[in-house]
Amino acid sequence: MNDTLNFTLIQTRLYWEDKQANLAMLEDKINNIQERTEIVVLPEMFSTGFSMKPKILAETMDGECVNWMKRIAIGKKVILTGSLIIEEDGNYYNRLIWMLPNGQYGYYNKRHRFGYAGEDEYYAAGDKRVIASVKGWKINLQVCYDLRFPVWARQEATSHEERLNSEPEYDLLLYVANWPEKRNHAWKTLLTARAIENQAYVIGVNRVGHDGNDIYHSGDSMVIDPLGTTLYHKANDEDVFTITLKKDRLQEVRNKFPFLKDADTFNIIH
């Protein structure tokens, strides 16, 4: 595990259901990043906003937005991540793409669909967690509403002996979101709770501004350390922020407070 890992968080307004406008806007923001960075994080459904029109807006993994991500990642030599509306085998997914600097990618399909907004009526649920590896750091990839379900994010071990004799399953939880301002207290509280209970860094990247349904988003993008200390928080305004996370802080917390070894043993049944 390398000593540091550099993230750039892009908290931005989104043009409602306008892919070309969003891609042009985001490309400009990415091209203007001056700091050294390794991972650039975009919000949930960054090309459209949180739309329930997948039949109109969905694309395949060979589509415009995935190819845009590939071009940007290769050109900027970064990992680029955010979620898109993807059609596959007759289903629609809210899919987080993890695009590598060599043009290869992985992906995570959002597990928990936001029924309050009808997401479960239009999108299929993911059935597996995805943990990416970067320079020895293990990153658990999740999307927005997943944040409300702590079991899905919990550091997993199948036995007490396994927990005692191995490293935690991951080092960082990453959430991309379109989380509305009216529930921003829950957003901030749950991000902090996930960091504390899993002894991991947490990054949450949210959008700002009104969407096409006149729902306001305050952003409140955050970076939280494994003790629950807020390292970055931005509300209401657009922002492009780069932060360096340190392995030493993670190990210090886990060594000083070895709480995970006392955790309950469980299995996630998909």
Image (cartoon, rainbow, N blue to C red):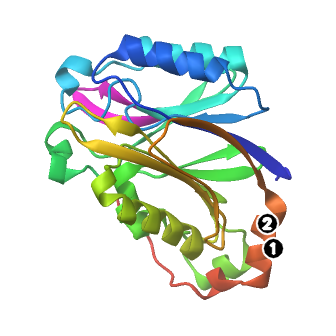
Amino acid type, callout 1:
Glu
Asked whether 89 falls inside the magenta stretch, the response is yes
Vertical relation: 256 (above or below) 172? below
- Labels 2 and 1 touching (C-beta < 8 A): yes
Q: Residue at x 50, y 72 (%)?
A: 193
| Farthest front residue in view | 237
Vertical relation: 248 (above or below) 78? below
Q: CA distance from mark 2 to mark 1?
A: 5 Å
Vertical relation: 94 (above or below) 190? above
**Residue 2 drawn at (x, y percent):** 84, 50
Q: Which numbered dot is residue 252? A: 1
Amino acid type, callout 2:
Arg
Which residues lie in the magenta part?
Answer: 84-98
Could one spot residue 142 in this view of the protein?
A: no
Asked whether 49 falls inside the magenta stretch, the response is no
The residue tagged 2 is 249
Horizontal side of 73 relative to 97 (left or right) equals right
